[in-house]
Image (cartoon, rainbow, N blue to C red):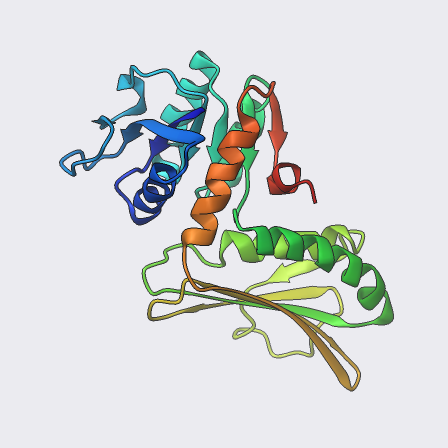
Amino acid sequence: MTNIIMVGCNGHMGQMISSIVEEDSDSRIVAGVDIFTEKKNSYPVYANISEVKEDADAIIDFSSPKVLDSVLTYAKEKKVPLIECSTGYTEEQVEQINAASKEVAVVRSANMSVGINLLMKLLKTAAKKLVNEGYDVEIVEKHHNLKKDAPSGTALALADAVNEASDNRFNYVYDRSKVSQARDKKELGISAVRGGTIVGDHDVIFAGTDEVITFSHTAYSKAVFAKGAVVAAKFIKGKGAGLYDMSDVLDI
């Protein structure tokens, strides 16, 4: 049995994870953390993680970068492994997460789905061949109209996968509206679309001469992210300090 503290428990993702865990005989949520404590849950809910009294094997954080400091402090002090799922972190906050992983086990991923993490592996293989053949690389991501950060953390992770496999030759370009010039070969363009209720749609385009190869991933429900977070919690139970990602969790 994996006992979980769910940070952001009353948000959409928190409630979806709660529903998945309720049907899972190998895990349970022992406490939740959310600024909205009025909602009735099958477990106690606290406004701040520092108030949590229950023992846990893992923390799943699907909340906001605003509460990162308190979550990291609790994880380090209590030695509770952390699944960090939120996006929109500053570079300084990413450094904080990396530093915390030296004291406690941390799984950090911009996207918890099996498909996206497999896609990142495939992109590395494709990039090693196609980029050297002169293909341009562009990424287009689409999300619902309530998403605040742009580009998405997943789009950046996909770009990083391509860039790492290409000897880090690319500079990321987010806006070409103010520059009137031909595309530079060292550009990797990332475009963001926001509208409607799109859960998550990512296209990685390798555009060559007379040929275009596109890798696509579409999420039709946020359940794919929720399931991944629960799998990660089970994986990290009992793990020693270190920084893990979903490729470790899924062994891909």
Is residue 49 among what the camera can see? yes
Relative to the observer, which residue lies in front, 149 or 177? 149
The quadrant of the picture occupied by the C terminus is: top right
Vertical relation: 246 (above or below) 1: below
* Residue reaching furthest to the bottom: 210
The residue lying toward the viewer, choosing from 220 and 86, is 220
x and y percentages locating residue 21 in the rendered image: 38, 38
Asked which quadrant contains residue 181, the reply is: bottom right
Nearer-the-camera pick, 110 or 91: 110
Identify whether 109 is placed above or below 48. Answer: below
The answer to whether residue 87 shows anywhere in this view is: no
- Give residue 11's position: percent from left, percent from top: 28, 45
143 left or right of 155? left
Residue at 59 percent across and 21 percent down: it is 239
Residue for point 54% across, 54% down: 154
Q: Residue at x 53, y 51 (%)?
A: 113
Q: Can you give x and y, in whole percent of width and height, for residue 146 in the image?
A: 32, 60
Q: Quadrant of residue 17?
A: top left
| Quadrant the N terminus occupies | top left
